[in-house]
Image: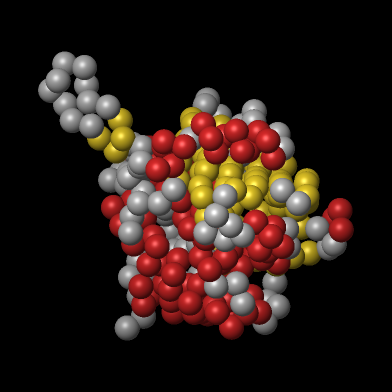
Amino acid sequence: MRRVQRPPALGHLLAGLLMAAFAALAPLAALAQAATPQTGAGPQALRDRYQALGAQLEHNVFGRKLALQSNEAADRLSGDIYAVIDHPFGDVARALQQPGVWCDILMLHLNTKHCAVQGGGKDTTVAVAVGRKFDQPLDSAQRIAFGYRVAAATSDYLDVRLDAAQGPMSTRNYRIVLEATPIEGRQTFIHLGYAYAYGTAARLAMKGYLATLGSDKIGFTTLPATGDGSGKPTPIGGVRGVVERNTMRYYLAIDSYLDAPATGQLDQRLAQWFDATERYAPQLHEVERSDYLQMKRAEFQRMASGTP
């Protein structure tokens, strides 16, 4: 039976019609935030970060070598994941410096409806359409065009940037950063960062979302118990919860792509991403497996057909 769509609303931007947009933009906004001061500092800085996070990578709630950080400022959100992935650096670097691969990665997310690489060289753009977590015509999706560049690609370091000066409904200064460097055991240490700024429309949309559909959603960070001993540790919610959930979704998309990068492995890639998100169901569960697979197969087919 085909699912009846409800009025749009998730984590994008502004009540009513704006909440519909927010349902689509929060995931991208979440991904788009990187640019912490150490971002892009080179291979040694990234290896130093790997050493500094050693204990956190080994002992955490994720069941894998991963550390997640999120920050909220007055008009800006940011999220960062540092993780060890079981792929040689050469394979990671060859894949992730290709703009078309980023379309395959971004499309695994529930809210990414379409992606196309436009232009070439210094003028390469990754054009993304984002929308509901259910089937949606492209003409009702929100669009954002990321300028794409490989900032560094050496034998021991990769730095890829996707930036957009403007987004829908008062969002601006999007930035996605992917850094990678080889470590022992033919593994790779990566940093996925995102950052974006927002104005009044986005703030109102986020407020509306968090008061309704997003009111019971949680992130991964645990807030300590109150000092008087009467409370219990609680998982973070609010905008940092939004950021953390979508940072994890995009990290899992990168990992799932690298596990099944061939054109004929789309079904494996989709199934792996969904199953990986279900390991963190309290934070990430949104739809049933069959619904996700059916929707994504149709969206990838639409993308392959060249539909703008």
At which x and y percent is residue 55? Answer: 41, 36
Image height of 130 relative to 220, above or below: below
Q: Quadrant of residue 207?
A: top left
Image height of 280 relative to 297, above or below: above
Image height of 56 relative to 177, above or below: above
Q: Quadrant of residue 41?
A: top right
Query: In front here: 114 or 280?
Result: 280
The answer to whether residue 35 is left or right of residue 229 is right
Image height of 224 relative to 180, above or below: above
- The quarter of the image holding the C terminus is bottom right
Q: Quadrant of residue 47?
A: top right
Residue at the image position 36 percent from the left and 49 percent from the top? 62
The answer to whether residue 175 is left or right of residue 10 is right
The answer to whether residue 174 is left or right of residue 17 is right
- The quarter of the image holding the N terminus is bottom left
Residue at the image position 45 percent from the left and 66 percent from the top? 273
Residue 84 visible, this angle: yes
